[in-house]
Image: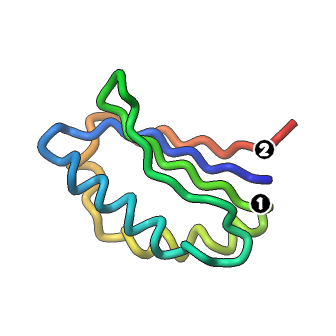
Amino acid sequence: MFVLMSIHHPHPEHRAALVDSMHRYGAAILGEAGLVSIRTLADEDSDRLVGLAIFDSREDYERLAPIARAAVADDPFDEWEQVPIDGLRLTEI
């Protein structure tokens, strides 16, 4: 199993655009072999949004991530985000 977790801190006025972007990222690979689950989540206690994608393997992530990234390649994250995206690539130990 391989997990990608992306933590976003959107500017309030760009929150809806960022959520839309996260949904497009997930939709680009939804249903593909090797993707277990993909979710867009909101933290109830802060402004943070979390993208959570679970893959069968790191190889599946490496195959599918470029497809998902292409769906949001032109999105202005530097304008939408208060701070850089905190991306975590997690493996089970």
Where residue 67 sits in the image (x, y, percent)? Answer: 53, 76
Residue ID at (38%, 68%):
24
Residue with the mark numbered 1: 58
Residue 63: image quadrant is bottom right
Q: Are marks 1 and 2 in contact (CB under 8 Å)?
A: yes
Q: Is residue 17 above or below residue 27?
A: above
Q: Please provide percent x and percent y for residue 18.
A: 28, 53
Instruction: Say how many tags the image has.
Output: 2
> Mark 2: which secondary structure?
strand
Mark before the other along the chain sequence, 1 or 2: 1
Name the residue located 64 percent from the left edge and 78 percent from the top edge. 32
Residue 66 screen position, x and y as percent? 56, 72
The mark found on residue 77 in the picture is: none
Q: Give the amino acid type for the residue marked by disc 2 in the picture.
A: Thr
Label 1: how many Cα within 10 Å (few below 14, some 14–19, many 20+): some
Q: Is the C terminus in the top left, top right, bottom left or bottom right quadrant? A: top right
Farthest residue, direction left = 13
- Colour approach in the figure: rainbow
At label 1, the amino acid type is Arg
The reply, left or right, for residue 46 in relation to residue 35 is left
Residue placed under numbered mark 2 in the picture = 91
